[in-house]
Image (cartoon, grey):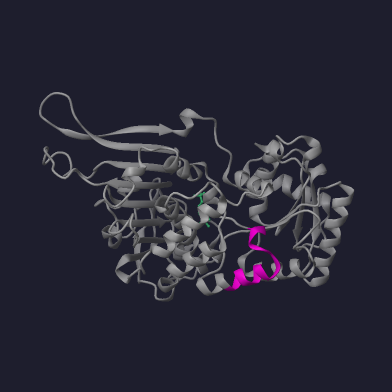
Amino acid sequence: MNQWVNRRDLFVIVGASGDLASRKLLPALYRLSHDVPADKRFRILGVATDSERNDEAFRQKILKEADELAGVKIDQKWLDETLFYQSIGHGGPDEYHALAARVAALEKSQQLSGNRVFYLALPPTIFPLSITRLGEAGLNQSDGWTRLVIEKPFGRDAESAEALNRLVHKYFEEKQVYRIDHYLGKETVQNLLVFRFANSLFEPLWNRDRVESVEIVVAESLGIEHRGRYYDTAGALRDMIQNHLTQLLTLTAMEPPASFEADAIQHEKVKVLKSIRPIGPGDVVFGQYARGEIDGKPVPSYRQEPDVAPDSHTETFVAMRLRISNWRWQGVPFYLRTGKRLPSRVSRILVNFRCPPVSLFQPFACSSLHPNALMITIQPDEGFDVQFEVKTPGLPFRVVTQNLHFRYSEAFEPSPEAYETLLLDVLLGDATQFVRDDWVEASWRLYTPILETPPTIALYPAGNWGPKEAERLSASPLLGNAAAS
Ligand code: BG6
């Protein structure tokens, strides 16, 4: 696919000394460039505050960190040819004008196309300043195209997201803007559209007549690692629900788009958000992990993590019930659930179908915990399972649940990393798997009332599926069933 990149563009990473650049972006760009003929390979300009650093020092830093943080051994020759460094000091107007001059100089010396990507790999508090400075320095346009990539979180609530969109639009047109949600780069997430709209098998069942409930679970066994400073001001609703889980929700619930064009797809996704009823206090449970065990090893409570307030009320777990009030989904609950320090790492969408109207096999079949279900596993062990009931051979007469399954790993070579896919899309100008301005605003509007009056936090021991209080916000009576089954 990479042969489609047939010009030598410039990729500018603003915030290039951070974790994201060494851990994800540069390894992804490195892999991406492999299939591109050498004379068409893009160049990368890393931009950060350190004014002592030069091209060579930056290449050495990336060489070391990509190996340490991502296990990727980047070739020195590739670095020498591809990667450059520019300081923006404290980010004043002069420094951004110097950046503009460096960009122009590189385009000349490296014979580049004039197409530019600016990737803001920055703490969100710095987005507004950086966007303003880029615009003021004239870096919002070029002789070719200019695209702006913005990492999540895009805003903290409805008001701040709208303000950020206004600022972005002051300097950039919406078609230049690529808001990243790395979940959209995962193969299994991209495949949701193909699964739904390239097959006729499920679409007739995909509605309130046949579906009893839908569960979307993103469980992590990791804690917050070294990200306490960020996480304690964010929490699971902002960090996971507003973006990743809501993307999965809109892809699962949307109507067929008029075409496979970015705008047609975005349009249907936004319609879903606009049809969701306000979320009531009884529809949400917040949890926070207490001390416990993961894989038999003791782990500290959230409040004991570095850079977390000892009396923090930040949620590390959210369970909620959403109701989509439209013709397709009226009356079907959508359960969302995410948490850190849960027993295992699994991301899954479970579509639970209704029981047959009459069960001939009571108490065997539909009195069991598993009516027919479609389980889409986003990660790990990516694939699909269809659960159905069968009779066990012989006597006594018993009905059990079996699976038809498909696994990506059995059918295909390993997929590229999400960032690789998304960065290629940016270079190709395909905005299908990015977040449009109205989606991000509609999503924040949905959750802002909860952020303003959050529910009380229920504690759960690390290594459990969440607080007991959340059990009622699940279609499976056993907490975590959707994740664990
Ligand atoms: C990030 C969140 O966006 O996604 C993290 O900030 C989370 O807190 C991560 O751990 C999960 O991503 P993945 O791809 O590992 O499921």
- Res. 301 visible in picture: no
Q: Quadrant of residue 380?
A: top left
Q: Is residue 459 left or right of residue 116?
A: left
Q: Is residue 193 above or below residue 340?
A: above
- At horizontal 82% and vertical 62% (from top left) the residue drawn is 100
Most foreground residue, 160 or 354: 354
- At horizontal 52% and vertical 47% (from top left) the residue drawn is 259
Residues drawn in magenta: 163-177
Number of numbered callouts drawn: 0
- Res. 394 visible in picture: yes
Image quadrant holding the N terminus, namely top right
Residue 453 place in picture, x, y as percent:
39, 76
Q: Quadrant of residue 131?
A: bottom right
Instruction: Specify the farthest residue to the top.
Output: 394
- At horizontal 71% and vertical 41% (from top left) the residue drawn is 5
Residue 283 place in picture, x, y as percent:
32, 66
Residue 133 place in picture, x, y as percent:
75, 69
Q: Is residue 471 left or right of residue 8?
A: left
Q: Is residue 376 left or right of residue 24?
A: left
Most foreground residue, 313 or 445: 445
Image quadrant holding the C terminus, namely top left
Residue 97 place in picture, x, y as percent:
83, 66
Q: Can residue 368 be found in the magenta stretch? A: no
Instruction: Specify the farthest residue to the front.
Output: 258
Main secondary structure along the magenta-highlighted residues: helix
